[in-house]
C-alpha cells in the first residue's frame, strides 16, 4: 500500500474508534468520573509535561532532521501549554506553584511511548496518535467548559492550545506519509498507533466496549 493510503487508513481507524465516545467520555475516563474544571486542568498539566518530556527524551536518539524539528517544536509548545494552564489554575484560586503533576509517577502511556526505539513508531505514537487523542479530549473539554459557563478556560483551549495540538498531529501525519513507505515500516507505525489508543487514559472507557484494541502490558 502506498504511504498516503496507509495513513488515510490509520486516520479512518482512529475516527471509527473515536465515534464510539460519548459526549464527555474522555473527560470521565481520565478523571475517574470527577468531571470538573480544576481536576481536568490539573490532569492536563500531567499530559503536557509528559508530552514535552517524551519529545525531549527522543530528540538526541532520533536521527532524522525532519523528525527532530517536530520533536523540538513539540517539546517547547507542550511546556508553553503547561504554563498557560498553570496560570489559569492560579486565576481559579489554585496554588499552581505547588502542584506536582508527576507526584503519582508517569502514566502507562508515557512508559510505553518512552520504550519506542524507531522514529516511525515514535512519531506514530506521539505527535500523530497522542495528539489526535488530545484533539478529541480538548474538543470535549471546551464543550464542557462552555456548558458550565467557564468561557475563559474554553477560550484558552479553543484559541491556542487546541490549535497547536492540531498542528502537532498534522506534522506527525505528514511525517508518516513521507516515511512509511514499506510494509515493515507501516507495520511498526500501525502497531504504535493501536497500542497508544489502547493505553491512553482518555480512551479507557472504550477498552470495554470495543474488541479491536488490546492493551499490551507495560511496566
Ligand atoms: Fe499541549
Ligand atoms: Fe501537542
Image (cartoon, grey):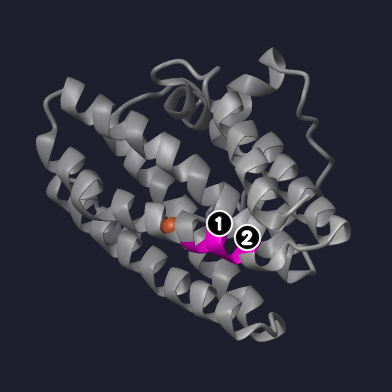
Q: Nearer the viewer, residue 212 or 200?
A: 212
Task: Tell me what residue is drawn at x 50 percent, y 80 percent.
Answer: 69
Q: Residue at x 48, y 28 (%)?
A: 26
Which is the main secondary structure of the residues drawn in magenta? helix
Element under label 1?
A: helix
> Where is residue 27 drawn, in percent x and y?
43, 28
Q: As drawn, which residue projects farthest toward the front?
A: 2
Q: Is residue 100 above or below residue 195?
A: below
In this orientation, does residue 36 appear? Answer: yes
Which residue is at a point 26% across and 34% down the rendered structure image?
Answer: 142
C-alpha span from label 1 to label 2:
6 Å
Residue 113: where, in percent of width, then height? 70, 57
- Foreground: 30 or 4? 4
Q: Are marks 1 and 2 in contact (CB under 8 Å)?
A: yes
Q: Farthest right residue?
A: 184
Q: How far from the left and from the top, in percent, is residue 175?
A: 59, 66
Residue carrying label 1: 173
Which segment did they paint magenta?
A: 171-177
Q: Which residue shows up at 22% across the image and 44% down it?
A: 158
> Could one spot residue 108 in this view of the protein?
no
Which residue is the site of mark 2?
177
Amino acid at each position: 500500500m502506498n504511504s498516503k493510503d496507509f495513513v488515510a487508513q490509520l486516520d479512518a481507524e482512529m475516527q471509527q474508534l473515536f465515534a464510539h465516545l460519548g459526549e464527555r467520555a474522555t473527560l470521565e475516563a481520565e478523571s475517574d468520573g470527577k468531571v470538573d474544571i480544576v481536576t481536568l486542568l490539573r490532569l492536563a498539566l500531567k499530559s503536557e509535561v509528559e508530552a514535552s518530556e517524551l519529545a525531549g527524551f527522543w530528540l538526541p536518539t532520533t536521527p532524522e532532521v525532519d523528525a527532530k524539528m517536530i520533536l523540538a517544536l513539540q517539546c517547547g509548545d507542550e511546556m508553553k501549554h503547561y504554563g498557560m494552564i498553570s496560570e489559569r489554575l492560579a486565576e481559579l484560586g489554585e496554588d499552581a506553584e505547588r502542584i506536582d503533576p508527576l507526584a503519582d509517577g508517569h502514566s502507562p502511556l508515557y512508559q510505553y511511548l518512552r520504550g519506542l526505539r524507531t522514529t516511525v513508531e515514535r512519531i506514530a505514537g506521539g505527535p500523530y496518535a497522542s495528539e489526535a487523542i488530545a484533539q478529541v479530549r480538548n474538543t470535549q473539554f471546551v464543550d464542557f467548559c462552555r456548558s458550565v459557563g467557564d468561557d475563559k478556560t474554553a477560550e484558552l483551549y479553543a484559541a491556542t492550545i487546541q490549535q497547536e495540538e492540531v498542528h502537532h498531529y498534522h506534522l506527525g501525519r505528514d511525517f508518516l506519509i513521507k516515511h512509511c513507505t514499506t510494509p515493515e515500516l507501516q507495520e511498526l507505525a500501525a502497531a504504535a498507533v493501536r497500542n497508544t489508543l489502547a493505553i491512553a487514559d482518555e480512551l479507557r472507557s472504550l477498552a470495554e466496549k470495543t474488541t479491536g484494541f488490546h492493551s499490551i502490558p507495560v511496566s
